[in-house]
Amino acid sequence: MNASRRTIARLVAPVLALALVAGCATPPPADDKEAVAEWEQVNDPLEPLNRAVFDFNRAADKYAIKPAAEGYRAVMPKFGRERVHNILTNLNSPLTFANDVLQGETDRAVQTFFRAMLNTTFGLAGFIDVATPAGIPPHEEDLGQTLAVWGVGEGPFLMLPIFGPSNPRDTVGLVAEMFADPFDLAMANMGKEYISYTRMGMTGLDKREALLDTLDEIERTSLDYYASLRSLYRQHRASEIKNGRGGGEKVPAPGLSGTPKGDELSQSAQ
Amino acid sequence: MISRRFLLAALAGSFLGLAFTPIAAAEADPKAFVAQLAGKAMETMTAKGLADAERNQRFRTQFTTDVDLPEIGRFVLGRHWRAATPEQQQEFIKSFEDIVVLTWATRFKDYGGDLRHVVTNAIADGERGIVVESMVERDHQTPINLQWKLKKGEPDLRVVDLVVEGASMAITYRNEYSAVIQANGGKIDGLLGAMRTKIAEMQAAKGTTKAN
């Protein structure tokens, strides 16, 4: 509990400080309809602030997070990293299960439940993922997705320090899950917060290590790294919320929309 | 390793099969088209004993035949396309082709490593559109879901978008490039300049001469 609270205080303070310095982006004039449509579709009124946070994140990544992830990859063999990933996924299953239930996804809730049962027992506390070969693949759910299923709008795009691309809805989900995680609550009750800290650190390392090649590749090939990540994040998130179902139909492809070439996709591209 | 060879052999087999059956060639199977496209690209990028210039040239030819880059380029530029002069449009399409080819050459090279590409499904999407679903399988990791958006053209099928885990590449390019235009005061020349710089950077990083 204390661990999470302090983390949040640390997160919120610099955001507020930067908001005062950086301010907001200027919307386009109302008579330029296409520019307004684009502005709404991009959904980033706090862009100057977000870009400032992004610069901070890139510096933190360059000097601390990425070297740590590279070190982790260099020191820990793939076999070990997979075991760590399995344990972390298993620790997350109570939250995933709760979100499956809250979203009314009965089948996925049952999957999560049996995965946790199998992997905690036969898989030695999640050390080995025995459920996937048994035909129950893993999936992730979080409170941000649950809120979305309940009809809560995403709000403007938000670049969080360290945590990266997000929005107010997903930030609420992230913070609430920090307070509500059953494993962390149990550890706090036993006075063993250091275990929660270790878990948080390992989760970060695991995620960054998995993204090492992908992020390098996006940075290598993009003209505007920030704009690329913003677009990829928002599209991917929209598809995650729908659990990958029917995500494709909402996204028009060039030349398929029936509209004249080069016309606005805006509304549906979200 | 064995399974990948088998896959490539199967792909080559199905390709020959199509080539010699006039009916099948006229009514090209979208699933086979995507499987071949990915198979050919991986093969070109990983085949041994090819000079780099030759390899890049071959990849570019295959890729630009199967993927409708001018169509995607017009979509990516969106409302700025109409504001651009014909010279700017031409330069944009040329630079866009360079960037996309340089980007995907590397990606297919990686895919040709220890990844398996499996085509799973094809669905009609409107009158002329087809969506082919496929998966990139990796050892001990969740597979990556892909959707290939195809358009029935006059002679053949062509790719007009690739959706990776819900993120459309065409829309990502579109959002990104419009951000660059905006950062340059709404000027397309700013984008063209940034693209030239990026192409030079990517070619330098590759350490090879540009094909064509």
Image (cartoon, coloured by chain):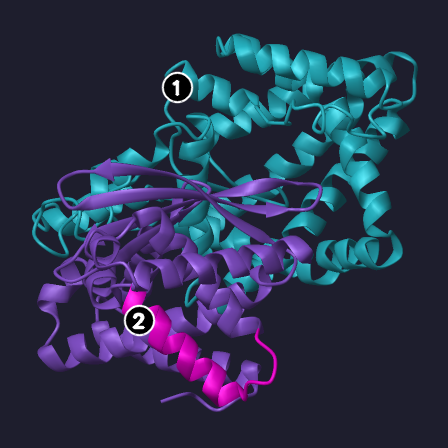
Chain colours: A cyan, B purple
The residue lying toward the viewer, choosing from B125 and A183, is: B125
- Give amino acid for label 1: Val
The residue lying toward the viewer, choosing from B4 and A116, is: B4
Q: In the picture provided, is B164 more to the left or to the right than B24?
A: right
Point out residue A123 in the picture as x, y percentages from the top left corner. Answer: 85, 23
Q: Are there few (<14), some (14-19), or many (20+) residues within 10 Å of tag 1?
A: few
Residue A152: which numbered mark, if any? 1
Question: What residue appears at the point 51 percent right and 24 percent down from the top-left corner?
Answer: A144
Q: In the picture provided, is B143 more to the left or to the right than A95?
A: left
Location of the N terminus of chain A (image quadrant):
top right
- The magenta region covers B47-66
- Give amino acid for label 2: Thr
For the stretch drawn in magenta, the main secondary structure is helix
Q: Are marks 1 and 2 on the same chain?
A: no
Question: What residue appears at the point 59 percent right and 12 percent down from the top-left corner?
Answer: A109
Question: What residue appears at the point 57 percent right and 75 percent down from the top-left corner?
Answer: B47
Say which quarter of the image contains residue A216: bottom right
Residue B64: which numbered mark, if any? 2
Element at badge 1? loop
Read off the chain for label 1: A
Magenta residue check for A168: no
